[in-house]
């Protein structure tokens, strides 16, 4: 039995990996696999390194936390293209969408290390001085169980923050509650130049699995590609997965979020994507020098199905 974990259980960013298990696409490829419903941002890369899981769906740069310079791990495929982070701000704040410098003096809530690293990097690249411009990045408030996407709503409801940073479910929940509006959507061009290339959602495994069981690694890629195509054709399939795993309001939102992201469902990892990843990882001390494409990615002929 193989095991798969994602960085954030109820995030649309990694949902393709979750759906690949829950909709049976791994099984169709002959891979007996279990979905691990834990918050993988806490310890997913470490569990991959230690053999507790076999696949990790998360930020492309996340493996560096447990596999320095990607030694011992590879990206098998993209779950979707480009950076997937959003910023929502309180609905009553007068601010022009996309104006990063207008965030001066605001409090922005963000959960855990992966997204906070990207948020700080984006703000600095946009020309903000984190000391003098008084942009405060706050650790998000605790929420029930694994539903960390709810921390954006909580931050604004409790006047803990003026905005939040994270996945699309955070924004959708806050918009639905009438509390927030979108300020930044990196995937669709908001933020400083190059921001959409900081990162992408990927499926990572170990070099050991690739070497010992190459057919399983290839089957995993085919399962992801089949899931991407199925969700593109019928986003309502997301509700079936959501009903099993998520709170009801999040399950109801997931088909809409999948439909919005479906144009970016492409398993290909391009050299340009790796260039952006190298630039981001070096700037944030995750690697010391640029790495060759082959050091990060396991090329697959199955990316296009």
Image (cartoon, rainbow, N blue to C red):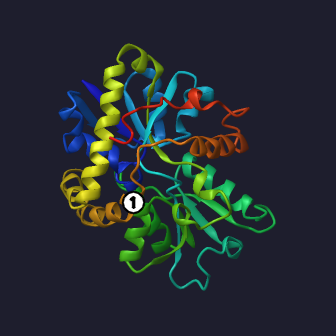
Question: From the viewer's perspective, is 66 left or right of 9?
Answer: right
Question: Disc 1 marks which residue?
Answer: 263
Residue at 72% in and 44% down: 283
Please state, as top left, top right, bottom left or bottom right, where the C terminus lies in the image.
Answer: top left
Residue 224 location, quadrant: top left
Residue in view at x 23 percent, y 27 percent: 31
Q: How many marks?
A: 1
**Residue 82, above or below 62:** below
In the image, 189: left or right of 132?
left
Q: For residue 36, say whether it is visible.
A: no
In this rendering, the answer to whether 217 lies above or below 154 is above
Mark 1, residues whose alpha carbon is within 10 Å: few (<14), some, or many (≥20)?
A: few
**Residue 145, position as x, y percentages in the image:** 34, 50
Q: Residue at x 74, y 68 (%)?
A: 134
Residue nearer the viewer, 29 or 246? 29
Task: Give the x, y percent position of residue 212.
Answer: 38, 13
Q: Please provide percent x and percent y for residue 117.
A: 63, 49
> Where's residue 172, x and y in %?
39, 69
Q: Image quadrant for the N terminus?
A: top left
Q: Please tell me in which quadrant of the rendered image residue 5 appears.
A: top left
Question: Residue drawn 18% across and 34% down?
Answer: 28
Residue 251 in the figure: left or right of residue 143? left
Which element is circle 1 on?
helix
Q: Is residue 36 above or below residue 23?
A: above
Is 33 above or below relative to 162? above
- Residue that protrudes farthest toward the top in the picture: 212
Is residue 299 something that shows in the picture?
yes
């Amino acid at each position: 039995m193989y095991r798969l974990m994602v960085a954030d259980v109820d995030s649309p960013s990694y949902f393709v990996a979750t759906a690949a298990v829950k909709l049976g696409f791994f099984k169709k490829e002959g891979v007996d696999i279990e979905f691990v419903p834990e918050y993988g941002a806490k310890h997913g890369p470490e569990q991959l390194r230690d053999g507790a899981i076999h696949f990790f769906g998360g930020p492309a740069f996340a493996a560096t936390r447990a596999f320095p310079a990607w030694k011992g791990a590879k990206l098998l495929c993209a779950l979707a293209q480009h950076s997937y982070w959003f910023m929502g701000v309180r609905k009553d704040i007068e601010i022009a969408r996309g104006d990063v410098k207008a965030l001066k003096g605001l409090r922005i809530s963000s959960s855990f290390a992966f997204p906070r690293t990207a948020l700080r990097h984006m703000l600095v690249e946009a020309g903000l001085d984190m000391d003098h411009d008084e942009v405060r990045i706050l650790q998000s408030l605790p929420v029930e169980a694994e539903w960390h996407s709810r921390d954006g709503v909580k931050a604004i409801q409790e006047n803990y923050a003026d905005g939040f940073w994270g996945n699309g479910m955070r924004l959708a929940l806050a918009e639905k509650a009438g509390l927030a509006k979108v300020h930044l959507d990196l995937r669709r061009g908001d933020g400083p130049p190059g921001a959409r290339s900081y990162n992408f959602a990927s499926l990572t495994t170990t070099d050991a699995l690739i070497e010992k069981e190459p057919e399983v690694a290839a089957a995993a890629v085919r399962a992801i590609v089949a899931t991407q195509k199925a969700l593109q054709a019928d986003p309502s399939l997301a509700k079936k997965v959501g009903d099993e795993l998520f709170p009801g309001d999040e399950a109801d939102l997931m088909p809409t979020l999948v439909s919005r992201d479906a144009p970016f469902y492409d398993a290909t990892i391009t050299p340009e994507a790796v260039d952006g990843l190298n630039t981001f990882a070096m700037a944030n001390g995750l690697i010391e020098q640029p790495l060759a494409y082959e050091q990060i990615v396991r090329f697959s002929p199955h990316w296009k199905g």
